[in-house]
């Protein structure tokens, strides 16, 4: 599995690293790893689905009023809501009467992984929970959108801190 490139899509919004370093570090470690391990299909599967040989990822940063919107969009396998439902039920989480979209949000629960093959890098059900905790601690929220066989988009909305507010931010 390979990612051809990670493209950056921005509207010119400026970020001050000190404010967002925890989030950016967490995203780069956990979410990009999740895309590579869980999201992007093998070369053979991608070719069977008439996709490019290598996965594509777009990282977006945009300003919206008093918020910063971060997004990661890939053209991978997508998240199967039935797999999330099974994993939630195994952990005793009630998912009855949940919509497809609500089931996919279950990926943020602690110990939820879409694979049974854990190794030192993935499959432990930690990465998405860590991202969610980081976003929540910053006063933000996140949502994931996915279509099986087409890809996934993670959207994170964080309050924007102006330069004058930097002294109040701890990293």
Image (tube, grey):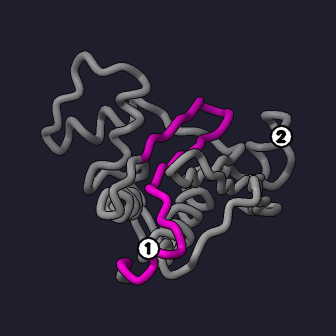
Q: For residue 1: magenta?
A: no
Q: Which mark is residue 51?
A: 2
Label 2 neighbourhood size at 10 Å, few (<14), some (14-19), many (20+)?
Answer: some
Label 1 neighbourhood size at 10 Å, few (<14), some (14-19), many (20+)?
Answer: few
Please indicate whether residue 162 sits to the left or right of residue 56 in the image. left
Whole-percent x and y of residue 51?
A: 83, 40
Image quarter where the N terminus lies is: bottom right
Q: Which residues are magenta?
A: 142-169
Please indicate whether residue 149 sits to the left or right of residue 2 in the image. left
Mark 1 vs 2: CB contact within 8 A? no
**Badge 1 or badge 2: first in the primary sequence:** 2
Please indicate whether residue 123 sits to the left or right of residue 94 in the image. right
User: Does residue 147 appear in the picture of this structure?
Assistant: yes
Please indicate whether residue 43 sits to the left or right of residue 81 in the image. right
Residue at the image position 33 percent from the left and 56 percent from the top: 139
Give whichever of 102, 167 is nearer the camera.
167
Q: Which mark is residue 165?
A: 1
Residue at the image position 56 percent from the left and 70 percent from the top: 28
């Amino acid at each position: 599995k390979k990612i051809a490139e990670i493209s950056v899509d921005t509207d010119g919004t400026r970020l001050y690293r000190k404010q967002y370093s925890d989030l950016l570090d967490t995203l780069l470690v956990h979410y990009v790893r999740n895309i590579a391990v869980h999201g992007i299909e093998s070369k053979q599967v991608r070719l069977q689905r008439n996709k490019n040989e290598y996965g594509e990822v777009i990282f977006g940063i945009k300003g919206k009023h008093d918020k910063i919107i971060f997004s990661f969009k890939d053209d991978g396998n997508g998240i199967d809501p039935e797999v999330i439902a099974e994993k939630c039920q195994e952990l005793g989480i009630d998912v009855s009467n949940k919509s497809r979209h609500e089931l996919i949000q279950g990926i943020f629960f602690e110990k939820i992984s879409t694979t049974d093959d854990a190794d030192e890098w993935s499959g432990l059900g930690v990465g998405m929970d860590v991202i969610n905790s980081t976003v929540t601690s910053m006063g933000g929220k996140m949502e994931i959108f996915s279509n099986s066989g087409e890809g996934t988009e993670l959207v994170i909305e964080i309050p924007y801190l102006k330069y004058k507010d930097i002294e109040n931010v701890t990293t």
